[in-house]
Image (cartoon, grey):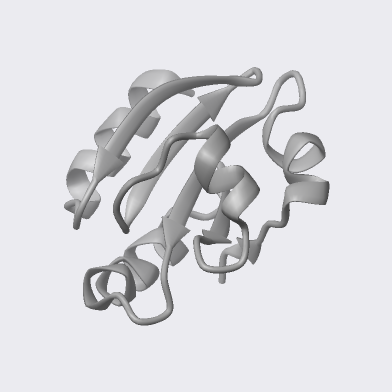
Amino acid sequence: MAERIHAGDFDSKVLADGTFALVDFYSDSCVPCKRMSPVLAELEGKLYVGKVNIAYEPELVEKYEVSSAPTLVFFKDGKEIQRLTGVQKKADLEKFISENV
């Protein structure tokens, strides 16, 4: 299961040099977010997968300008390289990951 990330450990887990990460900005009450959870769990091992609860991490929500959930943000070497909103197909995510590993 993806690891919950907080503002205090976001930089070390997501933005470190050499890190390829996917961050799921989600809400506990969001049905599309719940649909994405098993898909994201299957992606673990291909890259670091972390989750940010938008209700408890307003600093990260503001910093990354997240306006809806789920928002999936890919980071590589400390920089955002892709952002997707809403439910995504596993095949599309896997394709993007394989192109950027």
Q: How many marks?
A: 0
- Name the residue at 33% across, 32% down: 83
Looking at the image, residue 67 lies above or below residue 82? below
Q: Residue 64: percent from the left, percent from the top? A: 50, 34
Looking at the image, residue 61 lies above or below residue 17? below
Is residue 75 rendered to the left or right of residue 93? right
Q: Residue 89: percent from the left, percent from the top? A: 17, 52
- Name the residue at 49% across, 22% down: 80
The N terminus - image quarter: bottom right
Is residue 86 rendered to the left or right of residue 52? left
- Name the residue at 68% across, 57% down: 5
* Foreground of the two, 5 or 92: 5
Is residue 33 rendered to the left or right of residue 66? left
Looking at the image, residue 33 lies above or below residue 29? above
* Foreground of the two, 48 or 84: 84
Q: Residue 4: percent from the left, percent from the top? A: 65, 64
Is residue 4 rendered to the left or right of residue 21? right
* Foreground of the two, 66 or 23: 66
Q: Quadrant of residue 37?
A: bottom left
Q: Quadrant of residue 34?
A: bottom left
Asked if residue 68 shows in the view, the reply is yes
Asked if residue 22 shows in the view, the reply is no
